[in-house]
Structures are given as structure tokens and as C-alpha cells.
Image: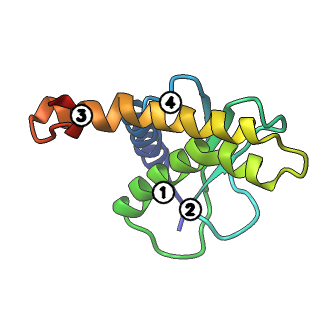
Amino acid sequence: MKTTAKHFEIFKKECQKWIKVFGLYGHRFYYQHEDIKGRQLAYCIYPDDHEDRVFTLGLTVNLDCEYSMIDIKKSAFHEVMEAFLYRIGNLARCRYVQPEEIDDEIHNIVRILENTIFDKGLNNGNHRSKHSR
């Protein structure tokens, strides 16, 4: 099956939704609708420099299996999460990483989650901090 320009627009829109939900404003994202090696519907191309947060999110054109619109949307979420967690994974694989680099990235992820997930919970009135007594 081939993905169409309409599928690609849905993929981009879904990626942008999750980028906004998770507040990935310190990242830059580019999009492409091209084939790459492998048998995957979507992909994330990582930066060469692990300090850089520039990613290309892509949707494969020619795929040799069936897929649904839900598969396209789920793939968009998956690729955004790959970008979200890329640096911590890269630090874990580095041979000469300093412990404070890992701590810095963990705190970066925690701050993103505080500014997105935690704040949404407060707006719903469903969460109350144990520390707010």
C-alpha cells in the first residue's frame, strides 16, 4: 500500500498535536514523506550531535503491508516519543558520559512532564498535592 499526501498531512498534524501536548518547544522538527530501508510505517531521524534537538519525522510512502488511520496516528505519537526520549537514551549509551549529564536530562524530562501532564491534572481539579497541606 502507498501512503498519500492526505495521510502525510494527518501524520504531520498528529505529530504537531503530541509535540504541543508534551511541550517539546526546545526541539525542532522537520517532516518528510519518503521511503527508508526497513518495513516501518513511520520513522524518526536523530541528530548527529547528541546535544542538538533537531529531528526529522517521516512517513513511508511504499509499504508492503496493510495499515489503518489509527496506525498512522499511533506512529506519529511513537516517533514524537522517540524524539522526546532520544537524548536520555543517547546518554545511557555513551561511554564517557558524566553522571550530571544524565541528571540534567532526567530533570529536563521531568520539567516537560510537570509543564504538561501535571498542569493538566491541576486544571481538572482531580489532583491534590500531598505537600500542599
Disc 1 residue type?
Answer: Ser
As measured in the structure, the alpha-carbon distance from the residue carrying label 1 to the one carrying label 3 is 38 Å
Identify the amino acid type marked 3: His
Q: CA distance from mark 1 to mark 2?
A: 7 Å
Looking at the image, tell me whether mark 4 or mark 3 is earlier in sequence order.
4
Rounded to the nearest whole Å, what is the CA distance between mark 2 and mark 4? Answer: 23 Å
Q: Nearer the viewer, mark 1 or mark 3?
A: 3
The percent coordinates of residue 66 (x first, y second) are 47, 74
The numbered mark, 1 or 2, whose residue comes first in the sequence reads 2
Q: Residues within 10 Å of mark 1 (few under 14, many from 20)?
A: many
Residue at the far right in the pictured view: 96
Q: Residue at x 41, y 63 (%)?
A: 71
Side (left or right) of 126 relative to 118: left
Residue receiving disc 2: 41
What's the distance in space between the residues labelled 4 and 1, CA to CA?
17 Å
Marks 2 and 1: in contact by CB < 8 Å?
Answer: yes
- Which of pointers 2 and 3 indicates the residue nearer the eye? 3
Would you call the spot at circle 4 few (<14 residues within 10 Å), some (14-19), or many (20 or more)?
Answer: some
Per the image, the residue denoted by label 3 is 131
Per the image, the residue denoted by label 1 is 75
| Residues under numbered marks 4 and 3 in contact, where contact means CB atoms less than 8 Å apart | no
Choose between 96 and 10: the one closer to the eye: 96
- Residue 22, label in figure: none
Mark 3 Cα shell of 10 Å, populated few (<14), some (14-19), many (≥20): few
Q: Residue at x 73, y 43 (%)?
A: 46
